[in-house]
């Protein structure tokens, strides 16, 4: 049975009687915050701002620079404005003015229980913090108390148990001293058609993790974790969300240790490129003892369409499409160290257009021939040739 989301408010004063840091007239601001409608990854935050001028004799009149707008940052993301005072509205004395609104915060960690809040007030028609006129009451970014919320784990639908993310053995590949690729796939029942988001939490052994989100498509794939430290043990937890909003209930767990001294390849060079094939050559560094190479070919959508592991420092992929963009990634592996110390480099390229060919009748029968066109720059190969058959024009062979 699906757990219900309780529509309840939990109010907390996160900023109490904060005095503005602009020029006169000064104002006090109090911010109350509450939350409701918590889900696995979202929550609604309601805020109420109470404003009042500092002195009974104070006043803030009308005009284009006399309005006040409030802005908020929730977990570092800015929201607003919330209009506290309109430009045609006059304030006088210490009368309190109250404005409220609600924002939806998304991309939350399932286990997140705190919302960090910052608050500021700008005058209309001027920059934040500007004090070169007599109009005051503005407030620079101010850190408020954080708002405690409940975990979203309890709101994962029970049917999510039919979706599980797991690492493909060993769960990582092409690791260096600064990055690693994580390989994943999922098992699910027939109601789950695709995974469209991953929640990835990773960190060094014994330390708190960093959570990121990746948009994906399908039931398997890979992603890169970068900015890692050398010779360091890491843990990675991966949750998946289906296109129907179903989250996996257990995480795929991957552990690995980055290595200290990266190997290198001097260069990766394309030595032959035709409309339908490519040959790449690897020039290894003379200081490294390399054993074998892994060649991965990606199409313009990022899908792997070719995979070859060999001891040769060259590789050819055929069956390509003319005038298409490709990426070729090469991973070099040092002797006796498997994939642990592999480092990769890549090249991108676009296959050239195919030259037109045509059948030419000779004494030995019909032979394939090239078609050339004479221009001001000499003879150049034709790219496309059409022949008239009956009343229609037809593209010549391979044209």
Image (spheres, rainbow, N blue to C red):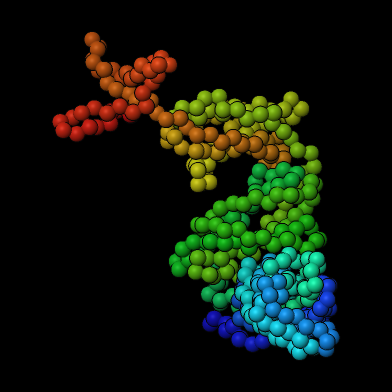
Nearer-the-camera pick, 221 or 88: 88
Pick whichever, 139 or 38, lies toward us: 139
The residue under the point 64% across, 87% down is 8
Which residue does the image show at 18% across and 29% down from the upper left? 389
Seen in the picture, residue 130 relative to 299 is either above or below; the reply is below
| Quadrant hosting residue 56 | bottom right
Query: Does residue 324 appear to the left or right of 389 in the view shown?
Result: right
Say whether residue 189 is visible: no
* Residue 261 visible somewhere in the drawing: yes
- Looking at the image, which is closer to me, 179 or 165? 179
Q: Position of residue 62 (x, y in %)?
A: 69, 78
Query: Can you name the residue that lies furthest to the left here?
Result: 390
The residue sitting at 80% across, 66% down in the picture is 132
Residue 171 coordinates in the image, percent (x, y): 64, 52
Number of numbered discs? 0
Q: Choose between 187 and 399: the one closer to the eye.
A: 399
Viewport quadrant of the C terminus: top left
Q: Is residue 48 above or below residue 259?
A: below
Q: Give residue 242's position: percent from left, percent from top.
A: 52, 65
Q: Residue 356 at x, y = what percent?
A: 34, 25
Kindly indicate the quadrant of the structure image that contains residue 362. top left
Q: Residue at x 46, y 37 (%)?
A: 324
């Amino acid at each position: 049975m699906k757990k219900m989301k309780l529509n309840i408010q939990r109010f907390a004063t996160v900023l109490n009687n904060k005095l503005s840091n602009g020029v006169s007239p000064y104002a006090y601001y109090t911010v109350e915050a509450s939350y409701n409608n918590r889900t696995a990854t979202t929550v609604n935050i309601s805020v109420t701002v109470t404003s009042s001028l500092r002195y009974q004799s104070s006043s803030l009149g009308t005009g284009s620079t006399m309005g006040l707008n409030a802005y908020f940052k929730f977990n570092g993301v800015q929201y607003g404005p919330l209009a506290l005072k309109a430009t045609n509205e006059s304030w006088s004395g210490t009368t309190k003015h109250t404005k409220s609104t609600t924002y939806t915060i998304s991309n939350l960690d399932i286990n997140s229980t705190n919302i960090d809040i910052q608050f500021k007030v700008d005058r209309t028609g001027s920059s934040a913090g500007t004090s070169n006129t007599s109009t005051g009451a503005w407030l620079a970014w101010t850190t408020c108390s954080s708002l405690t919320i409940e975990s979203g784990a309890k709101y994962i639908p029970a049917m999510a148990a039919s979706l599980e993310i797991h690492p493909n053995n060993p769960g990582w590949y092409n690791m260096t001293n600064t990055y690693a690729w994580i390989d994943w796939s999922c098992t699910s029942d027939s109601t789950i058609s695709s995974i469209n988001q991953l929640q990835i939490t990773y960190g060094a052994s014994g330390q708190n993790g960093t959570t990121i989100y990746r948009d994906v498509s399908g039931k398997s794939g890979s992603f890169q974790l970068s900015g890692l430290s050398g010779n360091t043990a890491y843990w990675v937890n991966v949750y998946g969300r289906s296109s129907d909003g179903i989250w996996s209930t257990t995480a795929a767990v991957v552990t690995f240790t980055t290595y200290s001294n990266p190997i290198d390849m001097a260069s990766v060079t394309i030595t032959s490129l035709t409309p339908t094939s490519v040959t790449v050559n690897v020039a290894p560094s003379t200081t490294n003892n390399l054993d074998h190479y892994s060649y991965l070919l990606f199409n313009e959508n990022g899908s792997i369409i070719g995979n070859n592991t060999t001891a040769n420092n060259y590789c050819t992929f055929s069956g390509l499409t003319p005038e298409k963009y490709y990426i070729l990634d090469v991973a070099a592996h040092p002797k006796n160290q498997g994939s642990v110390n592999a480092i990769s480099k890549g090249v991108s390229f676009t296959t050239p257009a195919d030259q037109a060919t045509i059948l030419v009748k000779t004494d030995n029968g019909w032979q394939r021939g090239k078609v050339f066109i004479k221009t001001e720059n000499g003879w150049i190969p034709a790219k496309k040739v059409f022949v008239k058959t009956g009343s229609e024009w037809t593209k010549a062979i391979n044209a």
